[in-house]
Image (cartoon, rainbow, N blue to C red):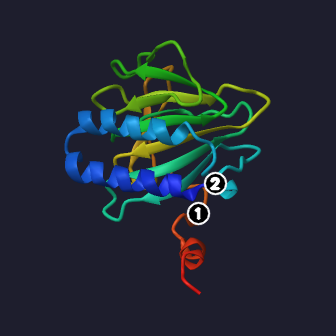
Amino acid sequence: MSNPERFRTFIASFTRLIERSGDDERTMLGEGARLLRELVRHDDWLPESAAQPHPQYYQQHLLHCDPLERFSVVSFVWGPGQKTPVHDHTVWGLIGMMRGAELCRRFERHDEGLPMSAAESVRLLPGDVDQVSPTVGDIHEVANAYDDRVSISIHVYGANIGAVARHVYDPATGAEKNFVSGYSSAQMPNFWDRSAEVRAGLQP
């Protein structure tokens, strides 16, 4: 992590946005996407602790949670070939690609017992930002586009997403099952220790 100030600036800007427009999903998705796109254009701020893959499971590292749980920021670390089940979010979300690439495939439910409709997969490349929510499309499957390298995306959600009751789906039948994702690490990285730079600016 060579430039934590970049993430601190993002959090400050996103906090101002949610204070101003948190009840307006369209603004949050539009203006929030612009802020996230600027963040993921640069790969110089994410701590190594939040960029480590697991040999079996994709990782969800909480980077920040608003004190009022109005939004959270998560790094998703995808080992080679790893993917999610088909799932929803129940809140708005933004997915910003930072390292590698992802394949995102949207699904639509029909009557219970019928197969779900699947759209074509969309490839997200570094700098791309995708959106999810119950109003713009909320059910999808996400996979690392590579079988031989790690990919990392940065997600912003309109809640403390690790504590939100959500659903996974069987695409063959549309059957749903409740789940709560939690987070892969019990600790958040410390972006907020600015003591060294403050000391450096003190007069002797």
In what element is the residue under mark 1? loop
Q: Is residue 68 left or right of residue 96?
A: left
Residue nearest the observer in this picture, 36 or 139: 36
Q: Which mark is residue 50?
A: 2
In front: 117, or 173? 117
| Dot label at residue 189 | 1
Kindly indicate the quadrant of the structure image that contains residue 109.
Answer: top left
Q: How many marks?
A: 2
| Mark toward the start of the polypeptide (2 vs 1) | 2
Left or right placement of residue 192 versus residue 161 in this view = right
**Against 200, is 81 above or below?**
above
In the rendered image, the vertical position of residue 61 relative to residue 92, given as above or below? below
Percent of width and height locating residue 115? 45, 16
Picture quarter with the C terminus: bottom right
Q: Amino acid at mark 1?
A: Pro
Circle 1 packing at 10 Å, graded few (<14), some (14-19), many (20+), is some
Q: CA distance from mark 2 to mark 1?
A: 7 Å
Of the 4 image quadrants, the one containing the N terminus is: bottom right
Q: Position of residue 49 (x, y in %)?
A: 68, 58
Provide the secondary structure element on which disc 2 rests.
helix
In depth, the one of 119 and 93 nearer the eye is 93
Rendered residue at 57%/71% (across/down)? 197
Picture quadrant where residue 201 is located: bottom right
Q: Residue placed at 47% from the left, 35% from the top?
A: 37
Disc 2: CA contacts within 10 A as few (<14), some (14-19) or many (>=20): many
Q: Is residue 79 left or right of residue 196?
A: right
Instruction: Relative to 84, say whether 57 is above or below.
Output: below
